[in-house]
Amino acid sequence: MAKYIIEGSKRLIGEISVGGAKNSVLPILAATVINRSSSIIFNAPKIKDLYIMIKILKSIGCKVKFSNNIVYIDSSTIDKVEIPEDLVREMRSSIILLGAMLSSCGETIISYPGGCEIGPRPIDLHLSSLKAMGAEINESHGFIHCKSKRLTGADIQLDYPSVGATENIILAAVKAKGTTIIRNAAREPEIIDLQNYLKKAGCKIYGAGTSVIRIDGVDSLKEVEHTIIPDRIVAGTYMIASAITGGELVLKNIEVDHIQSIIAKIKETGCNIYNNCTALKIVGPKRLEPIESIQTLPYPGFPTDIQAQTMALLTLARGTSVITETVFENRFKHVSELIRMGANIKIVGKVSIIKGVSELTGAKVTAKDLRGGASLVLAGLAASGTTIVDGIEHIERGYEELDINLNRLGASIKRQF
Ligand code: EPZ
């Protein structure tokens, strides 16, 4: 496994331009199979998950080119409905192709994505919603076979505002017969970005960003050019890199409106934050203040995807902080690794109690998931001595050139195969 070797205790200073959002480009690339025409997607991040999604699109017959953060897709040449099992196992979010393939081809076969490092990741809400729209779904031998000549619009109440389920229903509904209403829909900015892509393709979709989304089915979609929104989780991660090193960073090409909950909590640690709508300056304090309580919640609450990074920050606060992880069942795998670096953290069920220490010391640690891995890099930036982070393939699924960017800001990170 590749690793990062980090020499810690270096203040980060400088400017970073944040790339396109992983959790927006993946559903939008899935959506490109529907118009059976061309799509040009700008501001696409060079991350592992994007390359996997490109491999999937090529495997069903799409022509795809990716250069200079632009993806060119021609989905007029699709000639397969089966999504390769190995690629689904590698990236569970490929389940988002269920709805898109039903709209595009009326059929798909995809392996059960299964759980991942952060929890069992069920897809019951996805499947029950597609069934409500008339999809025939057979699940056997670990595969899901979905078929439907033409889906019918339905009024769907989601038990939980699931991001993936909301996206799958939208992609199934855009060419369904009649109207689909999604109630208790996810309100994440990535849903709004998906709606904007689909509107450009001629879809009739309204309400993304609110809890009720309406889609009136159309017969066909046209070609699209679209620019992906900035990655709010990458932005939050770089903010914490500045905070944890007592640095001074300027983030550019961000959507400040998408990170209000992160800004509010990081300000509680004593950081000074100055911003306009698309840029932000963050100055870390000499000593971090603790945060009495953080609860991860669906958007616009505090994002679960920034929980691990915030925990790394709070290990060095002057007091005790509490983080409750309410979204995923098993998203504390970074805790044991942070403790190896001298952190004082106790877990009681979904609650983590972080008692600040005066310093972290470099150690050999292992990334077990994407955001937990990022939290170990952040801890390594602040720790005294050398930190070796193993398993960085998890991190490179969602961060574009993280080591290169951090080194440009004054860090000392070597990437070793
Ligand atoms: C998306 O995952 C993101 N991934 C995740 O980001 C993010 O953490 C998550 O939304 C929450 O914001 C992508 O967009 C590719 P959910 P998703 O369905 O869609 C339960 C990262 O680090 N649930 O909103 O899988 C589920 O078990 C990744 O970038 C059901 O019970 O998230 C979980 O507890 C990690 N049944 C909760 O809902 C279902 O059918 C939230 O899951 C679906 C979900």
Image (cartoon, rainbow, N blue to C red):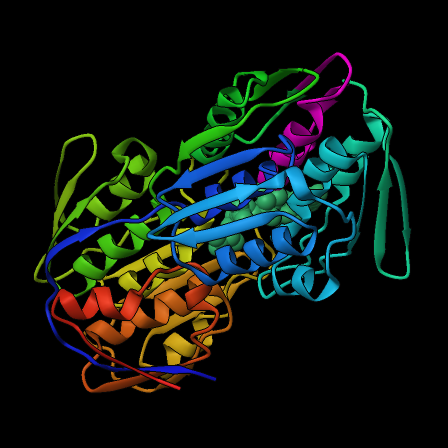
The answer to which image quadrant residue 103 occupies is top right
Spot occupied by residue 282 in the image (x, y as percentages of width and height): 13, 49
362 lies left or right of 190: left
Magenta span includes 156: yes
Q: Is residue 340 above or below residue 165?
A: below
Q: Nearer the viewer, residue 56 or 186?
A: 56
The answer to which image quadrant residue 222 occupies is top right
Q: Is residue 158 above or below residue 219?
A: below
Spot occupied by residue 202 in the image (x, y as percentages of width and height): 56, 17
- Total of numbered circles in the picture? 0
**What quarter of the picture does the C terminus occupy?**
bottom left
Residue occupying the point 22% across, 61% down: 241
Residue occupying the point 33% across, 75% down: 343
The answer to which image quadrant residue 132 occupies is top right
Whether residue 362 is visible: yes
Q: Nearer the viewer, residue 210 or 3?
A: 3
111 lies left or right of 403: right
Residue occupying the point 28% across, 71% down: 379
Spot occupied by residue 255 in the image (x, y as percentages of width and height): 28, 35
Q: Is residue 68 above or below residue 163?
A: below
Magenta span includes 163: yes
Spot occupied by residue 283 in the image (x, y as percentages of width and height): 10, 52
Residue occupying the point 51% across, 25% down: 195
Whether residue 318 is visible: no
Q: Nearer the viewer, residue 164 or 33?
A: 33
Q: What segment carries the magenta color?
A: 154-181
